């Protein structure tokens, strides 16, 4: 939330908010980079509801108050997780979960 915002008019023109994906891992068993968080600023006094159930999620009453709505997915497993003593360079991987 930020004091300079007074209305939710910005949401009329931008309805989809999507955080950036992380980067894939590289060679030598290096893990990839995590994706960036996305922060959506709303004016104080905003109520957040679950669209499916209608249940109130949060009441943002103070300036600077933050609430985690959705958590990012989990990355998959790369080749290194499937390596064995007889198969040192497997050509398989497991995708991540949204």
Image: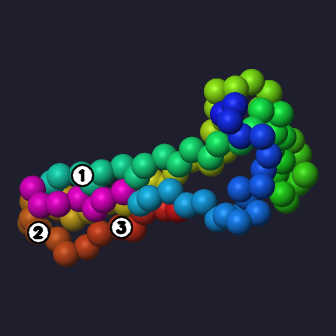
The residue lying at 17 percent from left, 60 percent from top is: 26
Q: Is residue 32 left or right of residue 2?
A: left
**Along the polypeptide, which appears first: circle 1 or circle 2?**
1
For discs 1 and 2, the disc positioned in front in the rendered view: 1
Name the residue carrying label 3. 94
> For the residue labelled by badge 1, is the local secondary structure a helix, a strand or a loop?
loop
25 is within the stretch colored magenta: yes
Q: Position of residue 47 (x, y in %)?
A: 84, 40
Measure the C-alpha gap from mark 2 to mark 3. Answer: 15 Å
Q: Position of residue 95 (x, y in %)?
A: 39, 68
Q: Position of residue 49 (x, y in %)?
A: 84, 48
The residue lying at 15 percent from left, 54 percent from top is: 29
Name the residue carrying label 2. 89
**Along the polypeptide, which appears first: circle 2 or circle 3?**
2
Question: For mark 1, does the 10 Å Cα neighbourhood hold few (<14), some (14 to 19), or many (20 or more) residues?
Answer: some
Residue 68 in view here: yes
> For the residue labelled by badge 2, is the local secondary structure a helix, a strand or a loop?
loop
Q: Position of residue 91 (x, y in %)?
A: 19, 75
């Amino acid at each position: 939330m930020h004091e300079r915002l007074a209305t939710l008019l910005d949401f009329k023109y931008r309805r989809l908010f999507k955080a950036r994906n992380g980067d894939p891992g590289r060679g030598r068993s290096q893990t990839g980079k995590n994706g960036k968080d996305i922060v959506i600023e709303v004016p104080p006094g905003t109520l957040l509801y679950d669209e499916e159930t209608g249940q109130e999620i949060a009441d943002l009453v103070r300036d600077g108050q933050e609430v985690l709505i959705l958590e990012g997915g989990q990355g998959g497993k790369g080749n290194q997780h499937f390596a064995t003593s007889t198969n040192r360079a497997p050509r398989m991987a497991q995708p991540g979960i949204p």
